Image (tube, grey):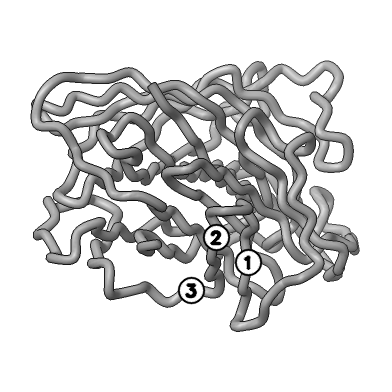
Amino acid sequence: MTRFLLLSLPLLAACGSGSSTPLAPAPRPMAVSVNASEQLNGTLDLSVDKATGETVFVLNGVEETNLTIDAEGGYGEIKYVTDTNTVSYTTIGRQGNLLTYDENRIYGAQALSDDAIAVLTLENLTDSGALVLERLSATTVPLSGSATMTGDYFGYTQRGGSNSPNLHQVLTIFTGDAKLDVDFADRMVSGSITNRNDRSRYTNQPYPGSSGYSDVILNAAAIDGFGGFAGIATGGGQNNAPHLDDATVTGSFEGLLTGAKATGAIGAIEIVTIDPNGLLIDGELAPRENLEVGIFSVSE
């Protein structure tokens, strides 16, 4: 098994090689490429038993033995990952009042196939968030032709960002349908996350009356020498939400082609929404930031 990506969130950054000989990657706007023998600093590591599909998670150097990996709690091929330990968050409410929440320590997601695994864990008070994208078999990227891949997306929103007083609090689960268009001849990818809905993290059911969220567009990005890609994501804001008319929404995505003939892909997106007037603290309006992170898994 060869490791390909180990990332620290919220900045999605890194890609690795499936070859024993490192290849020079094309310039990438948000990523630092590494070869198969290198690994970025992060808090999450894992190994997969291909015979049983069992995944061993190691956070901060300690193996996690009490994780629940639940397909029914996820979406499509992506499973919901959590634990039973809690951490307490003291946050500032919209009116400047202090609120205390008890949360599970670990919230995450896992997509596992014969060819690849994608795992996401969120940042909290004790652990840095991390992302692993890893091939479990060799991949050769074709030099011609094209492909359309479809699949699933599963993610979370939480308070995030250095200018938010509500760091780490998990708000909702996000689900959606992922699509990736691959042009092997021009070595480019583009795609989208559509049918995006927020769901309760307690029941995984859509919120009654939710207006949903706009599509996320994965803008055209180059495929590098490792079969990885990264680029700018646009859209993703809440529908019919006039209170967010002045909000700034920015995004990014990262991914890796998988399968013997690059017939699939795994990846992640990040959407940051900053509402400049989302908080009222001591009578003054202040910015409020939400962070959405999630993983996708697609195939032809």
| Gap in angstroms between the C-alphas marked 1 and 3 | 16 Å
Q: Residues within 10 Å of mark 2 (few under 14, many from 20)?
A: some
Q: Residues within 10 Å of mark 1 (few under 14, many from 20)?
A: some
| Residue 99 in sight | yes
Question: Which corner quadrant of the image does residue 134 belong to?
Answer: bottom left
- Give left or right: position of 279 versus 95: left
Disc on the earlier residue, 2 or 1: 2
Q: Position of residue 294 (x, y in %)?
A: 56, 43
Residue 56: mark in rendering: 1
Question: Which corner quadrant of the image does residue 233 belong to?
Answer: top left
Secondary structure of the residue carrying tag 1 is strand
Residue 10: mark in rendering: none
Amino acid type of the residue that numbered disc 2 sits on in the rendered structure = Val
The residue carrying mark 2 is 48
Question: Which callout, 1 or 3, points to the residue nearer the camera?
Answer: 1
Foreground pick, 148 / 284? 148
| Gap in angstroms between the C-alphas marked 3 and 2 | 18 Å
| Residue 98 in sight | no
Q: Position of residue 89 (x, y in %)?
A: 82, 67
Q: In the displayed image of the protein, which residue is found farthest to the front?
A: 51
Q: Residue at x 39, y 43 (%)?
A: 252
Q: Position of residue 202 (x, y in %)?
A: 87, 42
The residue carrying mark 3 is 42
| Gap in angstroms between the C-alphas marked 2 and 1 | 6 Å
Amino acid type of the residue that numbered disc 1 sits on in the rendered structure = Val
Amino acid type of the residue that numbered disc 3 sits on in the rendered structure = Gly
Query: In this picture, is 207 found above or below 115?
Result: above
Q: Quadrant of the C terminus?
A: top left
